[in-house]
């Protein structure tokens, strides 16, 4: 009778995911993952060809979690505003994961940028006014929304900005309406932000501000 595997691919992936959520990718090594599981590194290399293969699987698991559990949340009923608010909530309420995938990680940066762009475009297609815009204008709207959302996330999660959700909605709505109505960003194919969001190789102190 064949010997049943004690360490499965899913078990390794779950342990690797938990490690990233807790410590980020800085401590993402076979030894650290094996230590969490109480085993040698051998099972890891039996299920994954290399650590990069395991990292890719973890990033896909993170993207599935974000799509299904985080970015699917409803706040206002406005598709892009809700996407931005869920991103801000991630930064506030799950700082370890937010830092791991949006600040510290270098391996999955391009994959996560591509993921963010695709999520934004999915939401933008739900706006009748945006459907008549050129691809460049649509791309610029997503870029502008991403920049504003990231700024709010960084300031709010760090405690530098004391602002209500209603005030966030006002800021996001004003920016979104302005970008849809006006050609603000005017990016080109050579604009770095465009390249970072659409091309993927793989799939400080401030005073606290009160309003």
Image (cartoon, rainbow, N blue to C red):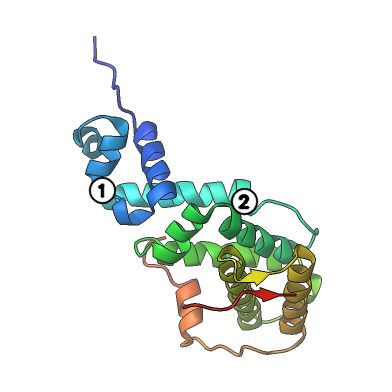
Image coordinates of residue 176 in percent, x first then y, are 73, 77
The answer to whether residue 10 is above or below residue 61 is above
Image coordinates of residue 35 in percent, x first then y, are 26, 36
Image coordinates of residue 15 in percent, x first then y, are 37, 38
Residue that mark 1 sits on: 29
Residue 130 seen from this side? no
Image coordinates of residue 140 in percent, x first then y, are 62, 81
Q: For this rendering, which residue is in front, 164 or 183?
A: 164
The circle drawn on residue 49 is: none
**Within-10-Å neighbours for mark 1: few <14, some 14–19, many 20+:** some
The answer to whether residue 176 is above or below residue 18 is below
Element type at mark 2:
helix
Residue at 61 percent across and 46 percent down: it is 68
Q: For this rendering, which residue is in front, 94 or 8?
A: 94
Residue that mark 2 sits on: 70
Residue at 24 percent across and 30 percent down: it is 39
**Within-10-Å neighbours for mark 2: few <14, some 14–19, many 20+:** some
The answer to whether residue 87 is above or below residue 46 is below
The answer to whether residue 123 is above or below residue 137 is above
Residue at 59 percent across and 74 percent down: it is 151
Residue at 60 percent across and 62 percent down: it is 119
Disc 1 + disc 2, Cβ < 8 Å: no
Element type at mark 1:
loop
In the rendered image, the quadrant that contains the C terminus is bottom right
Q: Is residue 164 left or right of residue 48?
A: right
Label whose residue precedes the other's in the sequence (1 or 2): 1
In the rendered image, the quadrant that contains the N terminus is top left
């Amino acid at each position: 009778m064949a010997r049943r595997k004690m360490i499965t691919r899913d078990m390794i992936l779950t342990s690797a995911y938990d490690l990233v959520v807790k410590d980020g990718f800085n401590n993402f090594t076979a030894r650290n993952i094996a230590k969490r599981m109480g085993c040698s590194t051998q099972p890891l290399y039996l299920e994954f060809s290399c650590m990069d293969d395991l990292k890719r699987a973890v990033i896909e698991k993170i993207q599935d979690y974000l799509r299904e559990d985080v970015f699917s949340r409803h706040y206002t009923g406005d598709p892009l505003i809700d996407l931005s608010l869920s991103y801000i909530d991630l930064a506030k309420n799950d700082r370890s994961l937010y830092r791991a995938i949006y600040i510290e990680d270098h391996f999955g940066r391009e994959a996560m940028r591509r993921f963010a762009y695709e999520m934004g475009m999915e939401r933008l297609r739900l706006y009748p006014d945006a459907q008549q815009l050129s691809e460049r204008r649509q791309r610029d709207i997503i870029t502008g929304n991403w920049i504003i959302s990231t700024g709010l996330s960084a300031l709010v999660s760090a405690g530098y900005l004391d602002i209500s959700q209603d005030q966030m909605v006002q800021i996001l709505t004003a920016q979104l309406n302005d970008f849809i109505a006006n050609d603000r960003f005017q990016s080109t194919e050579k604009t770095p932000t465009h390249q970072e969001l659409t091309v993927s190789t793989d799939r400080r102190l401030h005073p606290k501000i009160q309003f």
